[in-house]
């Protein structure tokens, strides 16, 4: 645990991504620092995470060259003045030593030892014990997926060191009691739809086992039952898919289109035809469903 402080620094930035600001390099007065829009800060953070010192960013129709070594954003327009950059980090309201004590209660070595998120983590029986202590059933409770999403866990049923710290920072908890008190909110935020889009998107990535990039239909249906529990057409869609898509693998695009169908199109499918970009498999399901409704 000798690298705990360094691990915390990395995890804190994952949980609370830095915001980036700029100002013009004008002569005289230093000018006012202005925040990049969230999308701009996200792009710069992604650049930094990849270890790149230089990259491009488009904002408001203008392309900028971002130089993280010189800390400037250079507009592509001729004679444009480079803009100075600064990074604004946010500190979570938690105590690092308290998180360490909480983590070591459940942690064990998890190979490989050179994993970027840490050589140890909460896994196996220790993971199940943590869930039990939190009052979460990892197989049936959306709170388990919401917690994994907050941790940005890369493996199902495993919270590696930096991922665990990231989750604690994001939720602002540093003890078991604090986290247990957040479980109801985690569950409610997903079921109410508040955090459903991000948890749903996250779930596909953690459910797929590398090097595969697709999810088997049977597995996808289990997650749909958890995450899209109140979709009126879920049962009909899953029954149709089981009959007509046997052996079908679900890629990320199709996974996200199911979410779009479930959350943006009413149960009577009255607005389905307004969007011509639906995949063919959806067209076939809608044709089947409408024929059934007409027959009944």
Image: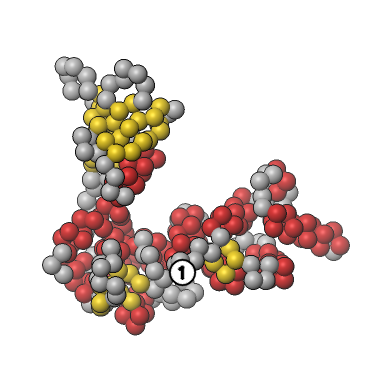
Residue 267 on image: x %, y %: 69, 56
**Where's the C terminus, which quadrant?**
bottom right
User: On screen, 187 above or below 134?
Assistant: above
Answer yes or no: is residue 142 visible: no
In this picture, residue 61 sits left or right of residue 239? left
User: On screen, 196 above or below 64?
Assistant: below
Residue 27 on image: x %, y %: 18, 17
Q: Nearer the viewer, residue 259 or 66?
A: 66
Mark 1: few, some, or many residues within 10 Å (few <14, many ≥20)?
Answer: some
User: On screen, 54 above or below 28?
Assistant: below
Identify the image's colour scheme: rainbow, by chain, secondary structure or one colour: secondary structure
The image quarter containing residue 4 is bottom left
**Where's the N terminus, which quadrant?**
bottom left
Q: Nearer the viewer, residue 192 or 247?
A: 247
Answer yes or no: is residue 52 visible: yes
The image quarter containing residue 137 is bottom left
Q: Nearer the viewer, residue 206 or 172?
A: 206
Residue at 21% x, 38% y is 69
């Amino acid at each position: 645990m000798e690298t705990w402080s360094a691990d915390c620094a990395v995890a804190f930035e994952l949980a609370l991504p830095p915001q980036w600001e700029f100002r013009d390099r004008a002569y005289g007065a230093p000018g006012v620092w202005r925040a990049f829009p969230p999308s701009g800060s996200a792009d710069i953070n992604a650049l930094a995470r990849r270890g790149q010192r230089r990259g491009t960013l488009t904002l408001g129709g203008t392309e900028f060259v971002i130089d993280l070594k010189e800390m400037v954003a250079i507009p592509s327009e001729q004679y444009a003045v480079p803009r100075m950059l600064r990074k604004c980090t946010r500190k979570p309201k938690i105590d690092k030593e308290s998180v360490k004590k909480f983590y070591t209660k459940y942690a064990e070595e998890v190979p490989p030892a050179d994993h970027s998120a840490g050589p140890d983590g909460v896994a196996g029986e220790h993971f199940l014990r943590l869930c039990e202590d939190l009052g979460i059933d990892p197989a049936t409770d959306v709170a388990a997926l919401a917690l994994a999403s907050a941790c940005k866990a890369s493996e199902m049923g495993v919270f590696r060191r930096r991922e665990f710290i990231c989750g604690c920072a994001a939720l602002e908890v540093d003890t078991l009691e604090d986290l247990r008190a957040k479980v109801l909110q985690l569950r409610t935020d997903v079921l109410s739809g508040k955090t459903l889009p991000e948890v749903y998107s996250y779930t596909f990535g953690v459910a797929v086992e590398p090097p595969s990039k697709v999810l088997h239909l049977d597995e996808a249906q289990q997650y749909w039952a958890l995450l899209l529990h109140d979709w009126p057409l879920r049962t009909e869609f899953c029954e149709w898919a089981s009959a007509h898509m046997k052996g079908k693998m679900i890629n990320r695009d199709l996974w996200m289109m199911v979410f779009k169908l479930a959350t943006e199109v009413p149960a009577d499918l009255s607005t389905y035809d307004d969007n011509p970009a639906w995949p063919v498999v959806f067209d076939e399901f809608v044709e089947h469903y409408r024929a059934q409704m007409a027959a009944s």
